[in-house]
Structure formats: C-alpha cells, structure tokens
Amino acid sequence: MPRTRQTDLAVLGALSVAPMTGYELRAAIAETLGHFWHESFGQVYPTLARLERDALVRRIGPGRTSGSRLEITDAGRERLRALLVEPIASPPPRNALLLRLFFGNHLPDGMAISLVEQARERALDHLARYAAVRAEPRGPEPGELYRSITLSYGEHLARAVVGWAEETLAILRGQRQ
Amino acid sequence: MPRTRQTDLAVLGALSVAPMTGYELRAAIAETLGHFWHESFGQVYPTLARLERDALVRRIGPGRTSGSRLEITDAGRERLRALLVEPIASPPPRNALLLRLFFGNHLPDGMAISLVEQARERALDHLARYAAVRAEPRGPEPGELYRSITLSYGEHLARAVVGWAEETLAILRGQRQ
DNA sequence: AGCAGCATGTAAGTGGTTACATGATTGT
DNA sequence: ACAATCATGTAACCACTTACATGCTGCT
C-alpha cells in the first residue's frame, strides 16, 4: 500500500464540496486545509487531467472568469469513499528541527536557544491563526464538526510545542551560566 | 534554499559521534534518531559515496565483520557546522489522518472514531517507547542534554495527540446516539 | 552445510517542487 | 493602458522509496 494517490484524495474531497476550476481548487485547499495539507499547481493540473480521463471528474460550465469548472462524478464519489477507507501510510518521520537540536553540542553558542525560540514563535503564530478561524461565524454545515476536529488537532499540537519550548528554554538558559 | 542535503546533515552528524560502516550508520540513525528521522539504504550509500568524493568523510579500517568504516574529516566537520546553522526549510504539511477526518462526513459509520482511536493508540505506543528509553541508564555524555530535549519533544507531542484524541472521541461518541 | 546478520550497492519508479511560459479577464 | 488576478499547463529536477542483486562472516 504505497503512500500514493493522496493528491487524488485531496482533490476529489474538495470537489465533493463544490465544482471548481483548477485554480479555485488549489486556493480552496490552501485556505481550508492549509494548516495540514498542501498541493502545488504542478500537482493539481496533471491530477485533474488524469481524473478527467478516468471519468472521476467532468468539465462543466465556465468558472468565475474563464476556464472550466470541474465536477465530481458518481464514479469519482465512489473513488473518494474507497480512498478514504484505505489504511493510512505515514511517511517516515523527518523533523529538521530535532535533527539540528540533537547535534546541539556542535551548534554555535546561543543557536540552540534561538532554534527553540523560533519553534515557540511559530507555534504561537499558528495558535493565533486558529483563533482567528474560530472567531469567524459559521453555520452548522455538514462538514463543520470535522473541520472543528482538525482545527482542534492543530491547537493541541501547537500548545504542546509551546509547552515544550518553554520548558526547554528554561533548561538551556539555566545551563548557560 | 532547497530542502536538500538533509541527509548529509544526518550522516555527517552521526559520523561526528563515531566512525561507522554504511550499515552501522543506518542502524545508528534508526536507533538513536528513529523517532524523528529516517534514512534508507538507497539514500545512505550514494550519500556516503558523494561525501567521500568531496573528502568530507574518509575510509578507515574494517568494520565489525567486513566492509570499511567511514570517518568524518575536518572538512566534513566544517560542513556539518555549516549545515547546522542553515535555516530550516520545512516541507509543506501533509497530514493524512487530518485529511481523512476533514472529509469525515463521507466516511462510513464508525470509521472516524476508529481513525481517532488508532491515532491515540499510536501515541500511547510512542509514549511507552520513550519511557523505555528514559529508563535506560546513561552517563552524562556531551550530547545527553540534547538527546533528552528531543525525547521531551516527542513526549509533549504524543501527550497532545492523546489529549486531542480523547476529547474528540468523547465528542464523536456523544454525537452517535 | 546452512542460516542469520553484516555489508554494499544499483535500477526503476514516484510523488512532489520549482520555475517557466502563456494568455484571458476585470478593475482602475 | 496597465496591473492584478484568474487560469492552465509543461519541463526539469529532486529526494526518496522499493525492490533487487550480490557476497561475506560467524555461529550452530
């Protein structure tokens, strides 16, 4: 079970909400799934072409300006369900921050502290953005519960990073003198 | 600043601790950095060949059975320091679990709950492994502080996942009846 | 003699990024 | 007229995984 067709899942999932052009699709993914998913144009367009060839999506009327919107077909919805229940193949872990920190004794003075501070700041940044999203008024749409659950995941993890960073900074700063 | 040469960093870092064969190197990375880093053989050997060509590592006496150990050179140590201070280029986020959960309303009944349960279990598993590592007796080696810091990161994050999972399970189970 | 573990590599393929090229539409 | 944004794609490249091929060493 390769780690493949993840892009298909994201694309079909997004199109299951509403028909979109490739451009809108990418924007929708960046906006809505942005804090845990990413697709580039170089990935979106070839994927859409393939999905269209396999009749999982279909071209319909024009988008906002030019271009044609793509709509998910029944076969596409079926495919989406099939992809959703496939076991998750996690990519091997690769945490660049921890890799650097692990070799912290080779780091120039103060660098380790600065790395941890940056991590803390980034996490606080994320928390602020999540709070902003939470503040937006929303109706009780069907996907709303699950949107909130993914947001909550981001919040828990960001808070954990802040906690770790503050603990670690206390240790590293204590170590210095 | 491409997301490249991360493998160089991991390899040079590991060799800065002790000379190793490619095989030992890979095992050392899996053991010590295992919870936040990964290298495959198909990556390790070409990298070692390139580093040797660039005189950042050098072949020395045989390993435990056959094969030759590789030692980091002064140029290699310099390179390592240079890589360590390079800004971190994070790969775009791609969380397969959240992607599935986000489209949770397309998931068959009970599937969302099962996904969250699995995530909880995996996190508990990680915590158990971290605890085992903590229990191993260790001397106050130079890298020990930083090893502990990366472990602590793993612990904070795993606890966050457990917390999120339990909160989420309560919500999803409440929703069902 | 045979097996487990040590050791080294290559080849093919994949998923993905980045940069480039191009053009239409809308608002100012 | 011009700029910004909408829109669609391609080409080159990259890191990485997987699978395969090969052979040595030490133990039983």
Image: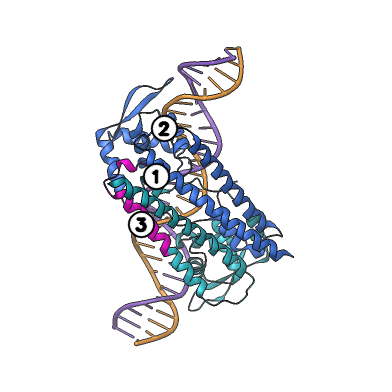
Chain colours: A blue, B cyan, C purple, D orange
In magenta stretch: residue A38: no
SS label for mark 3: helix
Residue drawn 50% across and 78% down?
B64
> Percent from the top left, x then y, of residue D18?
37, 57
Residue drawn 27% across and 45% down?
A82
* A170 versus A141 height, above or below: below
Quickly name the residue at label 3. Answer: B118
In magenta stretch: residue B107: yes
Q: Amino acid at mark 2?
A: Leu
Quickly name the residue at label 2. Answer: A25
- Segment tinted magenta in the rendering: B102-125
Q: Are marks 2 and 3 in contact (CB under 8 Å)?
A: no
> Percent from the top left, x then y, of residue B45?
50, 63
SS label for mark 2: helix
Q: Are marks 1 and 2 in contact (CB under 8 Å)?
A: no
Q: Nearer the viewer, mark 3 or mark 1?
A: 3
